[in-house]
C-alpha cells in the first residue's frame, strides 16, 4: 500500500499528481479556475501521450537497485557516491542514467517521495506539520513548507484542509 501511494509522481508519471491538482482546483473554484483547468488538462494530455510511447528496453538491474534504495531511504540524507558505489557504477553514470530513465535527478526523485509521504500523513493523521516535516526528512518546518508549496502549489496546512 505504501509503495502504491508513493508512486504518484514517479512510477505512474505525473498523471495521478495532475489528477490530484485538477480535483483540488475543482473544489476551490474561482474566476480563474477554467484557465487553470485547461492548463492542467493539457498537461494530462501531454503526459498521457508521453507514457503511451513505445517502451524502451528495461532498466538495468543496477539502476533499479539504486532507485529501490532511494525508495527505501528517501527520508534520510542520501549521497550520490554511496548510491553509485552500491550499484557498482560511477556517480556521473548513475546520475545521467537515472535522469534519462526516470526524467528527473536522484535528488528531485527523493524530494518528490518526501513530499508524497508528507501528503499521505497530512491527509490521514493529526500529527503537527513540524513532526511530518521531520519524519519526511526535512531539516525544519520552514524548509518543508517552501518545498511543499513549490511542488504542490499550496501550503501544507492548505493541503490538509482541502483533504478533509
Image (cartoon, helix red, strand yellow):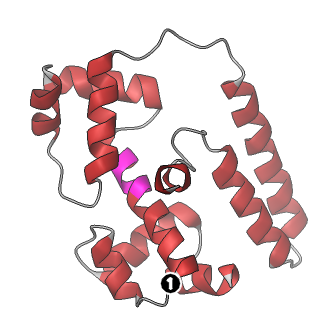
Which image quarter is the C terminus in? bottom right
Q: Residue 55: where, in percent of width, then height?
A: 60, 14
Q: How many marks?
A: 1
The magenta stretch is 109-113
Q: Is residue 86 above or below residue 142?
A: above
Q: Is residue 88 above or below residue 113?
A: above
Q: Say which residue appears at 10% left-offset and 38% top-offset.
A: 82
Q: Is residue 131 above or below residue 149?
A: below
Q: Is there any visible trace of residue 155 in the rendered image?
A: no
Q: Quadrant of residue 138?
A: bottom left
Q: Residue 19: where, in percent of width, then height?
A: 74, 55
Q: Say which residue appears at 28% left-offset and 29% top-offset.
A: 65
| Helix, strand or loop status at disc 1 | loop
Residue identified by numbered label 1: 125
User: Left or right: 78 with respect to 126?
Assistant: left
Q: Residue 48: where, in percent of width, then height?
A: 74, 33
Q: Nearer the viewer, residue 11 or 105?
A: 11
Q: Say which residue appears at 53% left-offset and 55% top-offset.
A: 1
Q: Is there any visible trace of residue 146 in the rendered image?
A: yes
**Crowd tier of the residue under label 1, counting other residues whose Cα lies within 10 Å: few below 14, some 14–19, many 20 or above:** few
Q: Residue 140: where, in percent of width, then height?
A: 26, 80
Q: Say which residue appears at 80% left-offset and 43% top-offset.
A: 42
Amino acid at each position: 500500500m505504501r509503495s502504491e501511494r508513493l508512486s504518484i509522481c514517479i512510477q505512474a508519471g505525473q498523471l495521478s499528481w495532475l489528477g490530484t491538482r485538477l480535483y483540488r482546483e475543482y473544489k476551490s473554484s474561482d474566476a480563474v479556475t477554467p484557465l487553470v483547468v485547461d492548463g492542467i488538462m493539457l498537461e494530462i494530455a501531454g503526459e498521457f501521450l508521453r507514457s503511451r510511447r513505445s517502451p524502451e528496453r528495461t532498466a538495468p538491474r543496477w539502476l533499479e537497485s539504486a532507485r529501490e534504495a532511494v525508495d527505501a531511504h528517501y527520508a534520510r540524507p542520501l549521497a550520490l557516491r554511496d548510491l553509485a558505489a552500491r550499484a557498482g557504477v560511477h556517480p556521473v553514470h548513475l546520475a545521467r542514467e537515472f535522469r534519462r530513465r526516470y526524467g528527473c535527478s536522484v535528488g528531485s526523485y527523493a524530494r518528490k517521495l518526501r513530499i508524497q509521504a508528507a501528503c499521505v500523513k497530512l491527509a490521514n493523521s493529526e500529527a503537527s506539520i513540524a513532526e511530518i516535516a521531520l519524519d519526511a526528512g526535512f531539516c525544519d518546518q520552514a524548509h518543508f513548507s517552501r518545498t511543499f508549496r513549490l511542488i504542490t502549489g499550496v501550503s501544507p496546512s492548505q493541503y490538509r484542509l482541502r483533504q478533509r
